[in-house]
Image: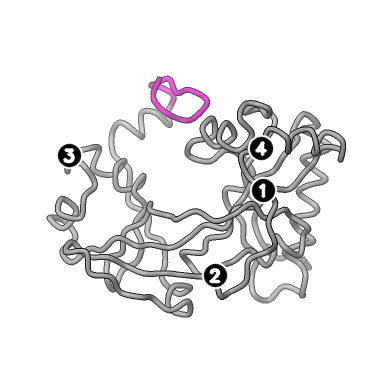
Amino acid sequence: IDGKLCGLAVWGWGVRPRQTIQHLFNGAVSIDEYVELCRFFVYDWVPKNTASRFLSTTHRLIKKYAPHVKVLYTYAAGFQGLIGTIYQAANYSYIGKKECKAFFYVSGRGLLHAVSLWHHFEGRLGSLSLANLAQVFPGIKRWHGYNFAYLYWLCETEEKNRLLKSASFQILPYPGKEELEIWTSDIDGNREIISVDIAKKIPILHLPTTGTLRKRRAGSIDVDAAGSPA
């Protein structure tokens, strides 16, 4: 907008694309027939409704250049206080929420994703239990919340109705803010409720990767379509 970057949308595959699409449609949609919204943001200064208009533009681009794609999948990070207002405004279908168990909280620093931790330490800590992680991050806690899952249909209505017959989900009424729940648990199982306002301000940290992953990214280790070592 006026020569300034206003946002970013990255469509691709998530961490476990084969399992995701199999779980959603029980084999009726192949891995090549869907993509996920992996990264998305717009700056606060952009005009109202920019986010939903931006999404609509990406939908048209995908439909034009990847006509085989039938379904778009994304989720709102409820563990960060988001319920998916943008997706609701863009006419996505809401298909339910699922607890997010992938993050750990280091007080005064931010959230660490389990995949980032595993790649950084390359298994040297053993399992990613709080007891093991506390050796490096004293006082670390597990971060809890929900992801609110959404679909956008690029296929025609007739095919959409056919795919819904194989689906493992139902299309549900849009969630409201009252469905947001965010909390931490420590090594002793003590639970602490986190307010939405606080959750929105806590950053997600990125740890530097080490040897094996760098080699993978350089192409010296084969990976399968799900991004795991072959």
Residues at discs 4 and 1 in contact (Cβ within 8 Å): yes
Of the residues shown, which amino acid type is indicated by label 1?
Gln
Identify the element where label 4 is drawn. Answer: loop
The location of residue 96, given as percent across then percent down, is 59, 54
* Image position of 34 (left or right of 216): right
Which residue occupies the foreground of this view, 24 or 56? 24
Q: Nearer the viewer, mark 3 or mark 2?
A: 2
Q: Residue at x 73, y 38 (%)?
A: 164
Q: Quadrant of the N terminus?
A: bottom right
Residue 227 in the image: above or below residue 7: above
Name the secondary structure under disc 3.
loop
CB under 8 Å between callouts 3 and 2? no
Whichever of callouts 3 and 2 sits on the residue coming sooner in the sequence is 3
Q: Magenta segment range?
A: 219-230
- Give the Cα distance between marks 4 and 1: 8 Å
Q: Nearer the viewer, residue 228 or 83?
A: 83
| Mark sitting earlier along the chain (4/3) | 3
* Crowd around label 4: few <14 · some 14–19 · many ≥20 (10 Å): some
CB-based contact (under 8 Å), mark 1 and mark 2? no
Residue at the image point whose x is 70% and y is 62% from the top: 173
Residue behind mark 4: 167
* Residue at 52% from the left image edge and 60% from the top image edge: 77
Residue that carries the numbered disc 2 in the rendered image: 179
Confirm whether the magenta stretch covers residue 43: no
Q: Residue 224, image x and y in percent?
A: 48, 22
For the residues carrying marks 4 and 3, which lies nearer the camera in this image? 4
What type is the residue that disc 2 sits on? Answer: Glu
Q: Nearer the viewer, mark 1 or mark 2?
A: 1
* Mark 1, secondary structure of its residue: loop
User: Please, what is the three-letter code of the amino acid marked with disc 3?
Assistant: Arg
Q: How is the image coloured?
A: one colour
Residue tagged by mark 1?
Answer: 170
